[in-house]
Amino acid sequence: MKLSIAIGLVLLLAHYAASLAAAGGGPRVIIVGAGMSGISAGKRLSDAGIGDFLILEATDRVGGRIHKTNFAGVNVEMGANWVEGVNGKEMNPIWTMVNDELKLRNFNSDYDHLANNTYKENGGLYEEAFVQKIIDRADEVEESGSKLSTTLHASGRDDMSVMAMQRLNDHIPSGPAAPVDMVIDYYKYDYEFAEPPRVTSLQNTKPLPTFNNFGDDVHFVADQRGYESVVYHVAGNYLKMNKSGAIVDPRLKLNTVVREIKYFPSGVMVKTEDGQIYRADYVMVSASLGVLQTDLIRFNPQLPSWKIVSIYQFDMSVYTKIFLKFPKRFWPEGPGTEFFLYASGRRGYYPVWQQFEQQYPGSNVLLVTVTDDESRRIEQQSDNQTKAEAVEVLRKMFPGKDVLDATDILVPRWWSNRFFKGTFSNWPIGVNRYEYDLIRAPVGRVYFTGEHTSEHYNGYVHGAYLAGIDSADILIKCAQKKICKYTVQGKYE
Ligand SMILES: Cc1cc2nc3c(=O)[nH]c(=O)nc-3n(C[C@H](O)[C@H](O)[C@H](O)COP(=O)(O)OP(=O)(O)OC[C@H]3O[C@@H](n4cnc5c(N)ncnc54)[C@H](O)[C@@H]3O)c2cc1C
Ligand SMILES: *[C@@H]1O[C@H](CO)[C@@H](O)[C@H](O)[C@H]1NC(C)=O
Ligand SMILES: *[C@@H]1O[C@H](CO)[C@@H](O)[C@H](O)[C@H]1NC(C)=O
Ligand SMILES: *[C@@H]1O[C@H](CO)[C@@H](O)[C@H](O)[C@H]1NC(C)=O
């Protein structure tokens, strides 16, 4: 009697294993999202012999937050634009792809001339020496903050905001302060993290592993093929492509919005907006932190509270690149003029500008970057309104010049878009390695990847790429070696 039950069970298991093995000889995995991390995870699985997977992507394209678009006759980048972390002690894997393998046209960004490219609120440049002093002081305080950061207890229990660190150095540039102090502060912190020093963790951003390990240089990708070529480059290793470079692999399904993930001890069931149901052994979710903070994807059963809390403790920031086209140029050109600042009395008001004399010659296009609350405000108003504001700022900066109305404007809306809900993750104060590791930790057969799960490089393209590899490895260990227990070190270990 006992024996027959045992045999029955073995048969049942054998039958189950056989049905799973039928398609590709291994487990079946569903990957949610075809951005850099999802595509990278797919490659790692494929390399490990797990070829039976399905990538479900909500939008009509591959690349996610790396996205070129045609504006005023040139392809510009609405999302990621720079390879950040170049010429350091370690090689940034994205730099290898961009510069060596794909040879994407790129430009080293030189921010060394801001001191004589900083405009007063009502026009004209500040004196170079005056601004240089402010920059030097900000650099000095940052340096001191990096030193302080490395002395803080590794658990993160002594973490503080970047702003608190500034105050400890008797430096209070964030505001209210003079417009020029605020714009330099904005350039140093918000322009990188898309959130102000008040909410950004000192310990986890200074020194920043990206620059510390990969180097201080940042290279702007301006190639008509688009920065997204790096995602296609990774995909090309294992997904079928046709002669024109389109992915034609049946394992990739575009326009497929995942709305529900049911997970059981024996497998997962994924429901999409069009009512389809897909079954698999595992699911790997690569949707952004912003998406995870909404109910676009319902988990059934609900994710455990430790998971929900860790997801909500982290921050999704908003970084908005506004492109403007003009009938003619009125801004300075030549070496040392690429980046310029507007010192408004309202911190973060159209602060950082870039001209594209080198990248898109003759296009008469300017880029202005805003973040955080300004981004959300601007996403909610008409592009006409934004255009009028930006042109008014330029007329103030260049009072003697004939600043004609912009003829075209591009305002990406990453925050409003339900498939992104922001641009990249930023590390808040007091969240330590423990909570961070929980964001990546699997829940049963549900695995997580994405830039927000990257061990050292959250917020970056290389972070997304490396996170895809790491999360795939965790899944592979479980699927192939049956080591499925994932341990996160305790908060104060
Ligand atoms: C404006 C902006 C500027 C940036 N600048 C830089 C930069 O200069 N340098 C740099 O290194 N990094 C930069 N980044 C960050 C970088 O782009 C990201 O870290 C990286 O591309 C994220 O990749 P990912 O795979 O984690 O996420 P994503 O690219 O968001 O991929 C996730 C995919 O999941 C899909 N998805 C979401 N929900 C669902 C669902 N329910 N069902 C199915 N599919 C779903 C999405 O459509 C998306 O394609 C920038 C990002 C933005 C937005
Ligand atoms: C490749 O596929 C894309 C998308 O399906 C299609 O538009 C294109 O014509 C195809 N090219 C070739 C050479 O088959
Ligand atoms: C700033 O200085 C650089 C190099 O010293 C110079 O090439 C550039 O034209 C100057 N910018 C402005 C706006 O004067
Ligand atoms: C924007 O303003 C222009 C004139 O200033 C007008 O012609 C156009 O219709 C407006 N567009 C929108 C979307 O409001």
Image: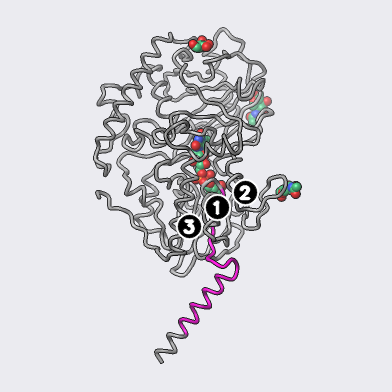
The mark tally for this picture is 3
Of residues 446 and 417, the one drawn nearer to the viewer in this rendering:
446
Residue 52 in view in this figure: yes
**In terms of secondary structure, where does tag 1 sit?**
helix
The span from disc 3 to disc 1 (Cα, nearest Å) is 27 Å
Label 1 crowd (10 A; few <14 / some 14-19 / many >=20)? many
Q: Are marks 1 and 2 in contact (CB under 8 Å)?
A: no
Q: Are marks 3 and 2 in contact (CB under 8 Å)?
A: no
Report the residue at 47% width, 16% height from top: 113
Within-10-Å neighbours for mark 2: few <14, some 14–19, many 20+? some
Q: Is residue 491 left or right of residue 398?
A: left
Residue identified by numbered label 1: 43
Residue 415 makes an appearance in the image: no
The x and y percentages for residue 463 are 46, 42
Task: From the viewer's perspective, tell me whether residue 26 is left or right of residue 490.
Answer: right
Residue 27 falls inside the magenta stretch? yes
